[in-house]
Image (tube, helix red, strand yellow):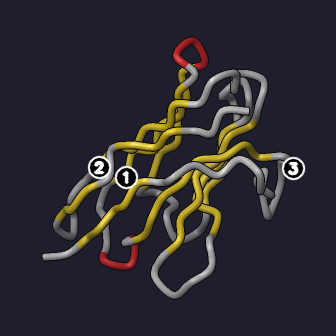
Amino acid sequence: QVQPVESGGGLVQPGGSLRLSCAASGISFNHMGWYRQAPGKEREFVAAISNGGLSTYYADSVKGRFTIARDNAKNTVYLQMNSLKPEDTAVYYCNKVVQWGSPFRPDYAYWGQGTQVTVSS
């Protein structure tokens, strides 16, 4: 299977916004999620969206600030990140969600390169 390609990361000041994209072929039947890994920490779940896009779920740490969306016609998943905080600094990855429901287990054979998000003044 072809790995996903994440993009849209960068350096942003606290309170700023970024929109991440994930291009991943053949994902229209899959639940999809965003995950992140900060330096020295384990990778953690951020947000998930069902295959049809009708259901979403967020980690408490990003609820109300981040929005996950998808365009199945473009095989793309998005993560709109607003009101960014320094603790959001991490490499962000998208992945298939193989089990809907906490902890939203990803497909461990499907990780891409990720995109770096740095929140700093």
Residue 24, x across and y down, in percent: 59, 30
Residue 39, x across and y down, in percent: 46, 82
- Where on the picture, by quarter, is residue 54? top right
Q: Do callouts 3 and 2 mark residues in contact (Cβ within 8 Å)? A: no
Q: Which residue is mark 1?
A: 81
41 left or right, relative to 82: right
Give above or below for 104 relative to 96.
below
User: Which amino acid is tagged 3?
Assistant: Gln
**Of pointers 3 and 2, the one earlier in the residue sequence:** 2
Residue 81, x across and y down, in percent: 37, 52
Give above or below for 121 relative to 24.
below
Q: Do callouts 1 and 2 mark residues in contact (Cβ within 8 Å)? A: yes
Around disc 2, counting alpha carbons within 10 Å, would you say few (fewer than 14), some (14 to 19), or many (20 or more)? some
**Of pointers 1 and 2, the one earlier in the residue sequence:** 2
The kind of secondary structure element at disc 1 is strand
How far, Cα to Cα, is label 1 from label 2?
5 Å
Label annotation for residue 68: none
How far, Cα to Cα, is label 3 from label 2?
27 Å
Q: Which residue is mark 2?
A: 18
Q: Image point 77% across, 51% down: which residue?
A: 109
The quadrant in which the N terminus is found is top right
Label annotation for residue 99: 3
Q: Residue furthest top?
A: 73
